[in-house]
Image (cartoon, rainbow, N blue to C red):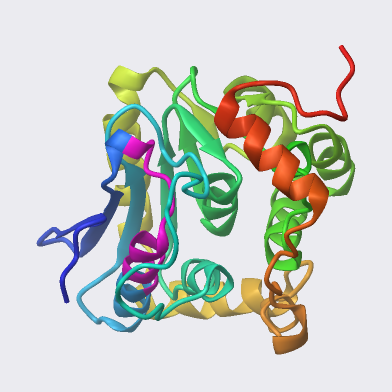
Amino acid sequence: MNLTAIAFDLSPRGVATITLNRPERGNALNQAAIDELGERFVHCSESGLVRVVVLRGAGKHFCAGADMGAKGPDIVQARFSLASMMEAVDTCSKPVIAVVQGAAVGGGFALASACDVVLAAPESFFSIPETRLGMAPSPVLSALFMRATGYRHFRRYGFSGERIAAARAHEMGFVSEVCPAAELDAKTAAVVDAMLRSAPRATAELKARVAEYGVPPASKLYAPEFRDAPHARTAEAEEGVAAFKEKRDPSWYKG
């Protein structure tokens, strides 16, 4: 595999570190990143050498969502859809820890939502900006957001697109712990060590039960009829994306 958008490391203790490696784009998700993430998580789920997975972003941000600057389809044929990549993260048989700094918005927020534990730096923030771009999040992303933040919180932040500061995300129960950026690596190592003390097979069985009884359960969330259909290029979506790229208010906002 020609992996360029994702960096991967496996420690002797069985800790796989998957790093979104497009810092010049805020680690935004293009098709190459989606494919590589999907492949890595499938590998980690199936590998007997992997015990815990740590997901993080290189540079200033965790993940700035979809790459709005991507120009057309990638040269290689897509191997994973956004939904199937999220499924690989969400249903990985190993515990997955997201380490968040800077922005985790849109697809980046969904990635963190698919992880088991979220550790965040104080300056990090989360948002669901799709409605501000003239479109609703896909069914899979909506369900991930709702499951991770709770029904009432999702309705507020999904409808408004407001930023959610790390401290607020912690109050909501989405972020497990907020700690200074300088201490984030040490905190991650401590959580990883705690998880390594748990038996691998018992952990995998527990993750399977979480998937079976979660709200909504993974069996429903990733059913074929629930997967995201291609977004229609509505007039609102065209205007929303144009306003984002041109750094102006969309036509529907009268300030």
Q: Is residue 225 above or below residue 104?
A: below
Give the residue displayed 86% in from the left and 23% down from the top: 253
Give the residue displayed 62% in from the left and 32% down from the top: 244
Left or right, 128 with reference to 77: right
Q: Is residue 125 above or below residue 239?
A: above
Residue 185: percent from left, percent from top:
27, 33
Residue found farthest to the left: 12
Q: Is residue 173 above or below residue 46?
A: above
Magenta highlight range? 25-38
Residue 162: percent from left, percent from top:
74, 27
How many marks are shown on the rendered structure?
A: 0
Residue found farthest to the top: 255
Helix, strand or loop: magenta stretch: helix
Give the residue displayed 83% in from the left and 32% down from the top: 160
Looking at the figure, which quarter contains the C terminus? top right
Residue 93: percent from left, percent from top:
44, 76
Between 26 and 231, which is closer to the camera in this rendering? 231
Between 154 and 14, which is closer to the camera in this rendering? 154
Q: Is residue 35 magenta?
A: yes
Between 47 and 129, which is closer to the camera in this rendering? 129
Q: Is residue 107 magenta?
A: no
Between 101 and 188, which is closer to the camera in this rendering? 101
